[in-house]
Image (cartoon, rainbow, N blue to C red):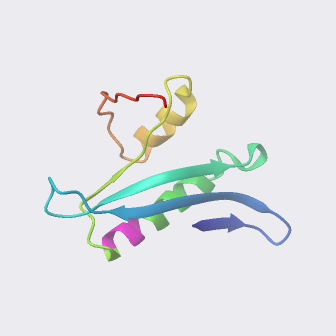
Amino acid sequence: MLIAHDAERILGFTACLSLPLINRDAPTCRLAALVVTDGARSQGVGAALVEQVELAARRWGCDRIEVTSGNDRPDAHRFYEREGFRPKPVRFVKPL
């Protein structure tokens, strides 16, 4: 987990992990959460957090970073695309 803050408050955070997969030679970095407070958006906080995730992923030997974002989050989708992520849409979920 990484936290972005200024002298007075938390501006955002991210959580990520290295995920070994049996069908890939290198692990995948899973960006499990990325949150930036409303007042800190569009100020580079999210980009700085993604940059730190990328550094961690490289240290772990990951060959890619993946993130999931719901269809109802077009602003988040634009952000991820600006950060170099590309959509790979097909995901199936079975609620339990």
How many marks the image carries: the answer is 0
Image spot of residue 56 (x, y percent) = 41, 71
| Residue span colored magenta | 54-58
The residue at the point 34 percent across, 30 percent down is: 91
Quarter occupied by residue 93 = top left
Image spot of residue 62 (x, y percent) = 27, 65
The residue at the point 48 percent across, 67 percent down is: 52
Image spot of residue 70 (x, y percent) = 50, 29
Q: Is residue 84 above or below residue 78?
A: below
Of all residues shown, which one is farthest toward the top? 72
Prevailing SS of the magenta stretch: helix
Q: Quadrant of the N terminus?
A: bottom right
The residue at the point 14 percent across, 53 percent down is: 23
The residue at the point 56 percent across, 23 percent down is: 72
* 49 sits left or right of 24 in the view: right
Q: Is residue 89 above or below residue 19?
A: above
Image spot of residue 18 (x, y percent) = 36, 65
Q: Is residue 92 above or below residue 18?
A: above
Quarter occupied by residue 38 = top right
Of all residues shown, which one is farthest toward the bottom? 59
Of all residues shown, which one is farthest toward the front? 96
Q: Residue 55 magenta-drawn?
A: yes
Of all residues shown, which one is farthest toward the right? 8
Q: Residue 24 magenta-drawn?
A: no
